[in-house]
Amino acid sequence: MRFRSISSLLLALAGLLSLAGCDRGVTSTAPSAEPSASRPQAELLAAAADPAVTEGAKAFAKYCALCHAKDATGYAADNAPSLVSPTFLESATDELIAAGIRMGRPGTAMAAYGQVRGGPLSESEIQNLVRFLRSKGPAPKALPPGGEGDAARGKEVFEKNCQTCHGNAAARGNAVNLQNPELLAAASPAFLRYAVVHGRPPTPMPSFQGRLSEGEIGDVVSFLWSFKPSLPTPEVKKTEVPSDLPVVINPKGKQAKFTLREGRYVSVEQVKDALAAKQRIVIIDARAASDWIQYHIPGAISVPYHDRDKLERVPNDGTWVVAYCACPHHASGEVVDALRAKNYANTAVMDEGILFWKDHGYPLTGEAMKAPGAPSAAPSAGKPGKPAAPAPKPKTAP
Protein backbone atom coordinates (compact mmCIF):
# COMPACT_ATOMS: atom_id res chain seq x y z
CA MET A 1 0.00 0.00 0.00
CA ARG A 2 1.46 3.33 -1.02
CA PHE A 3 0.89 6.45 1.03
CA ARG A 4 1.59 10.05 0.26
CA SER A 5 4.66 11.83 1.52
CA ILE A 6 4.49 14.58 4.10
CA SER A 7 4.46 17.24 1.43
CA SER A 8 1.28 15.79 -0.07
CA LEU A 9 -2.17 16.86 0.93
CA LEU A 10 -3.14 14.21 3.46
CA LEU A 11 -6.59 13.13 4.46
CA ALA A 12 -7.42 14.29 7.92
CA LEU A 13 -9.34 16.64 9.81
CA ALA A 14 -6.75 17.92 11.57
CA GLY A 15 -7.55 21.11 11.01
CA LEU A 16 -7.57 23.45 13.95
CA LEU A 17 -10.46 25.89 13.76
CA SER A 18 -11.41 27.29 10.38
CA LEU A 19 -13.87 25.53 8.14
CA ALA A 20 -11.94 24.65 5.01
CA GLY A 21 -13.53 22.75 2.17
CA CYS A 22 -13.19 21.86 -1.47
CA ASP A 23 -13.91 24.15 -4.37
CA ARG A 24 -15.73 22.26 -7.05
CA GLY A 25 -15.48 24.86 -9.76
CA VAL A 26 -16.66 27.77 -7.61
CA THR A 27 -14.37 30.65 -6.76
CA SER A 28 -14.22 31.73 -3.14
CA THR A 29 -15.54 35.22 -2.63
CA ALA A 30 -15.16 37.78 0.10
CA PRO A 31 -18.20 38.39 2.32
CA SER A 32 -20.86 40.26 0.44
CA ALA A 33 -22.68 41.45 3.56
CA GLU A 34 -20.80 44.15 5.43
CA PRO A 35 -17.29 42.82 4.93
CA SER A 36 -14.74 43.91 7.51
CA ALA A 37 -12.43 46.64 6.33
CA SER A 38 -8.70 46.03 6.39
CA ARG A 39 -7.13 46.89 9.71
CA PRO A 40 -5.67 50.40 9.85
CA GLN A 41 -1.90 50.59 9.48
CA ALA A 42 -1.59 52.05 12.97
CA GLU A 43 -3.29 48.98 14.45
CA LEU A 44 -1.01 46.65 12.53
CA LEU A 45 2.08 48.50 13.75
CA ALA A 46 0.80 48.42 17.32
CA ALA A 47 0.16 44.69 17.06
CA ALA A 48 3.66 44.09 15.73
CA ALA A 49 5.09 45.87 18.79
CA ASP A 50 2.86 44.00 21.25
CA PRO A 51 5.00 41.67 23.44
CA ALA A 52 2.14 39.15 23.53
CA VAL A 53 2.14 39.02 19.73
CA THR A 54 5.90 38.54 19.71
CA GLU A 55 5.66 35.66 22.17
CA GLY A 56 2.74 34.21 20.26
CA ALA A 57 4.78 34.27 17.06
CA LYS A 58 7.53 32.28 18.76
CA ALA A 59 5.04 29.72 20.04
CA PHE A 60 3.43 29.46 16.61
CA ALA A 61 6.78 28.78 14.97
CA LYS A 62 7.54 26.06 17.51
CA TYR A 63 4.21 24.27 17.74
CA CYS A 64 1.97 25.22 14.82
CA ALA A 65 3.97 26.10 11.71
CA LEU A 66 4.81 22.44 11.10
CA CYS A 67 1.27 21.87 9.80
CA HIS A 68 -0.31 25.32 9.47
CA ALA A 69 2.69 26.85 7.60
CA LYS A 70 5.03 29.58 8.76
CA ASP A 71 2.61 32.32 7.71
CA ALA A 72 -0.43 30.48 9.16
CA THR A 73 -2.02 30.12 5.73
CA GLY A 74 -2.28 26.37 6.26
CA TYR A 75 -1.81 23.22 4.21
CA ALA A 76 1.85 22.61 5.09
CA ALA A 77 0.82 19.12 6.25
CA ASP A 78 -2.28 17.05 6.79
CA ASN A 79 -4.58 19.63 5.19
CA ALA A 80 -4.24 21.77 8.31
CA PRO A 81 -6.41 24.79 7.47
CA SER A 82 -5.55 28.44 7.19
CA LEU A 83 -5.83 30.27 10.49
CA VAL A 84 -5.66 33.72 8.91
CA SER A 85 -8.46 33.63 6.36
CA PRO A 86 -10.22 36.99 6.82
CA THR A 87 -13.65 35.40 7.08
CA PHE A 88 -12.39 33.07 9.79
CA LEU A 89 -10.77 35.78 11.89
CA GLU A 90 -13.75 38.13 11.65
CA SER A 91 -16.22 35.40 12.62
CA ALA A 92 -14.28 33.54 15.32
CA THR A 93 -14.30 34.70 18.92
CA ASP A 94 -11.06 34.72 20.87
CA GLU A 95 -12.39 31.86 22.99
CA LEU A 96 -13.21 29.76 19.93
CA ILE A 97 -9.61 30.12 18.75
CA ALA A 98 -8.26 29.46 22.24
CA ALA A 99 -10.47 26.41 22.69
CA GLY A 100 -9.17 24.89 19.47
CA ILE A 101 -5.60 25.27 20.70
CA ARG A 102 -6.41 24.11 24.23
CA MET A 103 -8.63 21.12 23.42
CA GLY A 104 -7.52 20.13 19.93
CA ARG A 105 -9.62 18.07 17.55
CA PRO A 106 -9.92 14.48 18.84
CA GLY A 107 -9.50 11.81 16.21
CA THR A 108 -7.35 14.02 14.00
CA ALA A 109 -3.75 15.17 13.80
CA MET A 110 -4.65 18.31 15.77
CA ALA A 111 -3.63 17.61 19.36
CA ALA A 112 -4.73 19.42 22.49
CA TYR A 113 -1.96 21.87 23.34
CA GLY A 114 -3.36 23.16 26.62
CA GLN A 115 -1.66 22.09 29.84
CA VAL A 116 -5.10 21.17 31.20
CA ARG A 117 -5.07 18.30 28.68
CA GLY A 118 -1.40 17.40 29.06
CA GLY A 119 -0.14 19.71 26.33
CA PRO A 120 2.78 22.15 26.56
CA LEU A 121 0.96 25.51 26.64
CA SER A 122 -0.24 27.51 29.64
CA GLU A 123 -3.35 29.64 29.36
CA SER A 124 -1.24 32.79 28.99
CA GLU A 125 0.73 31.17 26.16
CA ILE A 126 -2.52 30.19 24.46
CA GLN A 127 -3.73 33.78 24.72
CA ASN A 128 -0.44 34.95 23.19
CA LEU A 129 -1.09 32.65 20.24
CA VAL A 130 -4.57 34.10 19.87
CA ARG A 131 -3.11 37.62 19.89
CA PHE A 132 -0.60 36.60 17.24
CA LEU A 133 -3.31 35.22 14.95
CA ARG A 134 -5.45 38.29 15.58
CA SER A 135 -2.57 40.46 14.38
CA LYS A 136 -2.83 38.79 10.97
CA GLY A 137 -6.28 40.00 9.98
CA PRO A 138 -9.58 41.65 10.81
CA ALA A 139 -11.01 41.91 14.30
CA PRO A 140 -14.07 39.83 15.22
CA LYS A 141 -17.46 41.32 14.51
CA ALA A 142 -21.06 40.67 15.45
CA LEU A 143 -22.52 37.90 13.30
CA PRO A 144 -26.02 37.47 11.94
CA PRO A 145 -28.02 34.77 13.76
CA GLY A 146 -27.38 31.20 12.74
CA GLY A 147 -31.02 30.77 11.87
CA GLU A 148 -33.25 27.78 12.35
CA GLY A 149 -33.74 24.91 10.00
CA ASP A 150 -34.63 21.28 9.62
CA ALA A 151 -31.77 18.91 10.49
CA ALA A 152 -33.20 16.06 8.42
CA ARG A 153 -33.32 18.23 5.30
CA GLY A 154 -29.90 19.59 6.23
CA LYS A 155 -28.49 16.07 6.16
CA GLU A 156 -29.47 15.82 2.50
CA VAL A 157 -27.95 19.23 1.72
CA PHE A 158 -24.74 18.27 3.52
CA GLU A 159 -24.39 14.95 1.71
CA LYS A 160 -24.90 16.62 -1.66
CA ASN A 161 -22.72 19.70 -1.19
CA CYS A 162 -20.30 19.19 1.71
CA GLN A 163 -19.62 15.55 2.52
CA THR A 164 -17.20 14.89 -0.34
CA CYS A 165 -14.72 17.33 1.18
CA HIS A 166 -15.63 17.41 4.86
CA GLY A 167 -16.45 13.74 5.38
CA ASN A 168 -18.76 12.84 8.24
CA ALA A 169 -18.69 11.37 11.73
CA ALA A 170 -17.54 8.00 10.37
CA ALA A 171 -14.98 8.96 7.72
CA ARG A 172 -12.82 12.00 7.23
CA GLY A 173 -12.35 13.92 4.03
CA ASN A 174 -9.78 16.44 2.86
CA ALA A 175 -11.26 19.29 4.87
CA VAL A 176 -12.17 20.03 8.48
CA ASN A 177 -14.57 17.51 10.00
CA LEU A 178 -17.56 19.69 10.85
CA GLN A 179 -18.99 17.09 13.21
CA ASN A 180 -15.94 17.07 15.47
CA PRO A 181 -17.17 17.38 19.08
CA GLU A 182 -14.57 19.94 20.17
CA LEU A 183 -15.27 22.17 17.18
CA LEU A 184 -18.98 22.14 17.92
CA ALA A 185 -18.44 22.62 21.66
CA ALA A 186 -16.65 25.91 20.94
CA ALA A 187 -18.52 27.14 17.86
CA SER A 188 -21.98 28.64 17.43
CA PRO A 189 -24.66 28.31 14.75
CA ALA A 190 -23.82 31.86 13.68
CA PHE A 191 -20.15 30.92 13.17
CA LEU A 192 -21.09 27.87 11.10
CA ARG A 193 -23.54 29.86 9.00
CA TYR A 194 -20.98 32.57 8.32
CA ALA A 195 -18.53 29.99 6.99
CA VAL A 196 -21.14 28.48 4.68
CA VAL A 197 -22.27 31.85 3.37
CA HIS A 198 -18.86 33.50 2.94
CA GLY A 199 -16.43 30.62 2.52
CA ARG A 200 -12.80 30.84 3.55
CA PRO A 201 -10.96 32.86 0.90
CA PRO A 202 -8.33 32.34 -0.37
CA THR A 203 -8.58 28.64 0.60
CA PRO A 204 -10.47 26.08 -1.51
CA MET A 205 -13.60 26.57 0.65
CA PRO A 206 -16.05 28.51 -1.56
CA SER A 207 -18.89 30.78 -0.64
CA PHE A 208 -22.24 29.02 -0.91
CA GLN A 209 -24.17 32.26 -1.09
CA GLY A 210 -26.23 31.97 -4.26
CA ARG A 211 -25.61 28.24 -4.51
CA LEU A 212 -27.81 27.37 -1.55
CA SER A 213 -31.01 29.09 -0.54
CA GLU A 214 -31.34 30.72 2.88
CA GLY A 215 -33.51 27.80 3.92
CA GLU A 216 -30.94 25.24 2.80
CA ILE A 217 -28.19 27.09 4.67
CA GLY A 218 -30.31 27.08 7.82
CA ASP A 219 -31.02 23.38 7.34
CA VAL A 220 -27.36 22.39 6.97
CA VAL A 221 -26.38 24.50 10.00
CA SER A 222 -29.09 22.78 12.04
CA PHE A 223 -27.84 19.40 10.85
CA LEU A 224 -24.28 20.18 11.94
CA TRP A 225 -25.45 21.66 15.23
CA SER A 226 -27.33 18.45 16.00
CA PHE A 227 -23.95 16.80 16.61
CA LYS A 228 -22.98 19.23 19.37
CA PRO A 229 -22.04 17.14 22.43
CA SER A 230 -24.49 17.29 25.30
CA LEU A 231 -21.81 16.79 27.97
CA PRO A 232 -18.48 18.56 28.51
CA THR A 233 -15.25 16.78 27.65
CA PRO A 234 -14.09 14.66 30.63
CA GLU A 235 -11.03 15.98 32.43
CA VAL A 236 -7.81 14.05 32.00
CA LYS A 237 -6.63 12.11 35.04
CA LYS A 238 -2.95 12.88 34.52
CA THR A 239 -1.48 15.80 32.63
CA GLU A 240 2.13 14.64 32.56
CA VAL A 241 3.88 11.71 30.92
CA PRO A 242 6.01 9.68 33.36
CA SER A 243 9.70 10.43 32.80
CA ASP A 244 11.00 7.02 33.85
CA LEU A 245 9.23 4.76 31.36
CA PRO A 246 11.34 2.01 29.76
CA VAL A 247 12.66 3.08 26.38
CA VAL A 248 13.29 -0.29 24.72
CA ILE A 249 10.40 -2.70 24.16
CA ASN A 250 11.37 -6.36 24.60
CA PRO A 251 15.00 -5.53 25.50
CA LYS A 252 15.96 -9.22 25.53
CA GLY A 253 14.19 -10.01 22.28
CA LYS A 254 15.69 -10.50 18.85
CA GLN A 255 16.45 -7.46 16.75
CA ALA A 256 13.52 -6.44 14.56
CA LYS A 257 14.01 -6.58 10.79
CA PHE A 258 12.13 -4.20 8.54
CA THR A 259 11.85 -3.54 4.83
CA LEU A 260 11.49 0.20 4.28
CA ARG A 261 9.66 2.02 1.53
CA GLU A 262 11.89 4.69 -0.02
CA GLY A 263 14.46 3.96 2.66
CA ARG A 264 12.28 5.76 5.22
CA TYR A 265 8.83 4.27 5.84
CA VAL A 266 7.93 1.03 7.61
CA SER A 267 4.42 -0.34 7.33
CA VAL A 268 2.03 -0.65 10.24
CA GLU A 269 1.82 -4.39 9.62
CA GLN A 270 5.57 -4.86 10.06
CA VAL A 271 5.53 -2.92 13.33
CA LYS A 272 2.55 -4.89 14.61
CA ASP A 273 4.21 -8.17 13.69
CA ALA A 274 7.47 -7.16 15.41
CA LEU A 275 5.59 -6.43 18.63
CA ALA A 276 3.64 -9.68 18.40
CA ALA A 277 6.92 -11.57 17.95
CA LYS A 278 8.34 -9.77 21.02
CA GLN A 279 11.24 -8.35 19.04
CA ARG A 280 13.52 -5.64 20.39
CA ILE A 281 12.39 -2.20 19.24
CA VAL A 282 11.99 1.43 20.31
CA ILE A 283 8.72 3.13 19.36
CA ILE A 284 8.42 6.90 19.63
CA ASP A 285 5.13 8.78 19.74
CA ALA A 286 6.00 12.10 18.08
CA ARG A 287 2.64 13.75 18.78
CA ALA A 288 2.06 16.24 21.57
CA ALA A 289 2.11 14.56 24.98
CA SER A 290 -1.64 15.12 25.34
CA ASP A 291 -2.24 12.65 22.54
CA TRP A 292 0.07 10.08 24.14
CA ILE A 293 -1.95 10.41 27.35
CA GLN A 294 -5.17 9.67 25.48
CA TYR A 295 -3.87 6.65 23.58
CA HIS A 296 -0.61 5.24 22.27
CA ILE A 297 0.96 2.00 21.15
CA PRO A 298 1.88 -0.05 24.25
CA GLY A 299 5.50 0.57 25.15
CA ALA A 300 5.82 3.72 23.03
CA ILE A 301 7.63 6.62 24.66
CA SER A 302 6.54 10.23 24.23
CA VAL A 303 9.03 12.42 22.36
CA PRO A 304 6.99 15.28 20.88
CA TYR A 305 8.29 16.76 17.63
CA HIS A 306 8.68 20.08 19.46
CA ASP A 307 10.74 18.61 22.33
CA ARG A 308 13.41 16.51 20.66
CA ASP A 309 15.85 16.87 23.58
CA LYS A 310 14.14 13.78 24.98
CA LEU A 311 15.80 11.73 22.24
CA GLU A 312 18.89 11.60 24.45
CA ARG A 313 17.26 8.64 26.23
CA VAL A 314 17.10 6.57 23.04
CA PRO A 315 20.02 4.10 22.74
CA ASN A 316 22.16 4.42 19.62
CA ASP A 317 23.14 0.75 19.46
CA GLY A 318 21.50 -0.41 16.24
CA THR A 319 18.10 -1.11 17.79
CA TRP A 320 15.34 -0.17 15.37
CA VAL A 321 13.67 3.11 16.30
CA VAL A 322 10.23 3.70 14.77
CA ALA A 323 8.43 7.03 15.15
CA TYR A 324 4.76 7.62 14.49
CA CYS A 325 2.32 10.52 14.46
CA ALA A 326 -1.15 11.20 13.10
CA CYS A 327 -0.13 13.27 10.06
CA PRO A 328 0.91 10.47 9.24
CA HIS A 329 4.49 11.46 8.27
CA HIS A 330 5.26 15.04 9.20
CA ALA A 331 5.84 15.17 12.98
CA SER A 332 7.31 11.66 13.04
CA GLY A 333 9.52 12.63 10.12
CA GLU A 334 10.95 15.50 12.17
CA VAL A 335 11.92 13.05 14.91
CA VAL A 336 13.44 10.54 12.49
CA ASP A 337 15.44 13.30 10.79
CA ALA A 338 16.80 14.35 14.19
CA LEU A 339 17.86 10.76 14.91
CA ARG A 340 19.50 10.36 11.52
CA ALA A 341 21.39 13.61 12.06
CA LYS A 342 22.87 11.90 15.14
CA ASN A 343 23.85 8.87 13.03
CA TYR A 344 21.29 6.42 14.38
CA ALA A 345 21.61 3.44 12.05
CA ASN A 346 18.09 1.98 12.02
CA THR A 347 15.27 4.50 12.03
CA ALA A 348 11.91 4.67 10.29
CA VAL A 349 8.62 6.53 10.11
CA MET A 350 5.54 4.35 10.62
CA ASP A 351 4.04 4.83 7.20
CA GLU A 352 0.30 4.92 7.74
CA GLY A 353 0.35 6.62 11.14
CA ILE A 354 -1.43 6.06 14.43
CA LEU A 355 -4.95 6.75 13.11
CA PHE A 356 -4.58 3.86 10.66
CA TRP A 357 -3.32 1.69 13.53
CA LYS A 358 -6.29 2.68 15.66
CA ASP A 359 -8.83 2.22 12.87
CA HIS A 360 -7.64 -1.36 12.41
CA GLY A 361 -8.13 -2.20 16.07
CA TYR A 362 -4.47 -2.84 16.83
CA PRO A 363 -3.33 -2.66 20.48
CA LEU A 364 -3.52 0.72 22.19
CA THR A 365 -3.36 1.91 25.76
CA GLY A 366 -4.11 5.21 27.48
CA GLU A 367 -6.85 7.09 29.28
CA ALA A 368 -9.26 7.08 26.37
CA MET A 369 -8.93 3.33 25.98
CA LYS A 370 -9.66 2.68 29.66
CA ALA A 371 -12.59 5.05 30.03
CA PRO A 372 -16.21 3.90 29.75
CA GLY A 373 -17.20 3.98 26.11
CA ALA A 374 -13.53 4.06 25.16
CA PRO A 375 -13.98 3.58 21.40
CA SER A 376 -15.71 6.95 21.17
CA ALA A 377 -13.63 8.70 23.84
CA ALA A 378 -10.95 9.41 21.26
CA PRO A 379 -12.99 9.26 18.06
CA SER A 380 -11.19 8.54 14.84
CA ALA A 381 -12.07 10.55 11.81
CA GLY A 382 -11.93 7.45 9.63
CA LYS A 383 -9.44 5.91 7.26
CA PRO A 384 -7.67 8.02 4.65
CA GLY A 385 -9.33 7.53 1.32
CA LYS A 386 -12.31 5.67 2.72
CA PRO A 387 -15.60 6.87 1.22
CA ALA A 388 -17.74 8.76 3.68
CA ALA A 389 -20.29 6.51 5.33
CA PRO A 390 -23.87 7.60 5.98
CA ALA A 391 -24.04 10.10 8.80
CA PRO A 392 -25.69 9.15 12.10
CA LYS A 393 -29.34 10.02 12.50
CA PRO A 394 -29.48 13.68 13.56
CA LYS A 395 -30.85 14.84 16.85
CA THR A 396 -33.55 17.42 17.18
CA ALA A 397 -32.65 20.61 15.36
CA PRO A 398 -31.87 23.68 17.44
Image (spheres, helix red, strand yellow):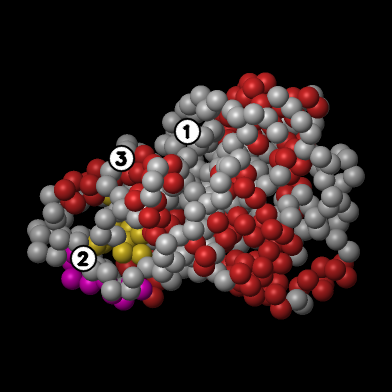
Instruction: Determine whether 319 is above or below 350 in the image.
Output: below
Of label 3 and label 1, which has the lower sequence position?
1
Number of other residues with Cα within 10 Å of mark 3, as a class: few under 14, some 14 to 19, many 20 or more: few
**Which secondary structure, mark 2?**
loop
User: Could you give the CA–CA distance between mark 3 and mark 1, rounded to whole angstroms?
Assistant: 15 Å
Q: Main secondary structure of the magenta part?
A: loop
Report whether 295 appears left or right of 94.
left
User: CA–CA distance between discs 3 and 2?
Assistant: 23 Å
Q: Is residue 311 magenta?
A: yes
User: What is the number of the mark on residue 201?
Assistant: none
Magenta-span inclusion, residue 157: no
- Asked if one can make out residue 181 in the rendered structure from this viewpoint, the answer is yes
**Are the residues tagged 1 and 2 within 8 Å (C-beta)?**
no
Q: Quick check: marks 3 and 1 in contact, CB under 8 Å?
A: no
Crowd tier of the residue under label 2, counting other residues whose Cα lies within 10 Å: few below 14, some 14–19, many 20 or above: many
Q: Position of residue 42 (x, y in %)?
A: 88, 70
Question: Badge 1, how many Cα within 10 Å: few under 14, some, many 20+?
Answer: some
The secondary structure type at the circle numbered 3 is loop
- The span picked out in magenta is 310-319
Going by the numbered disc 2, the residue's amino acid type is: Val
**Which residue does the numbered mark 2 point to in the structure image?**
248
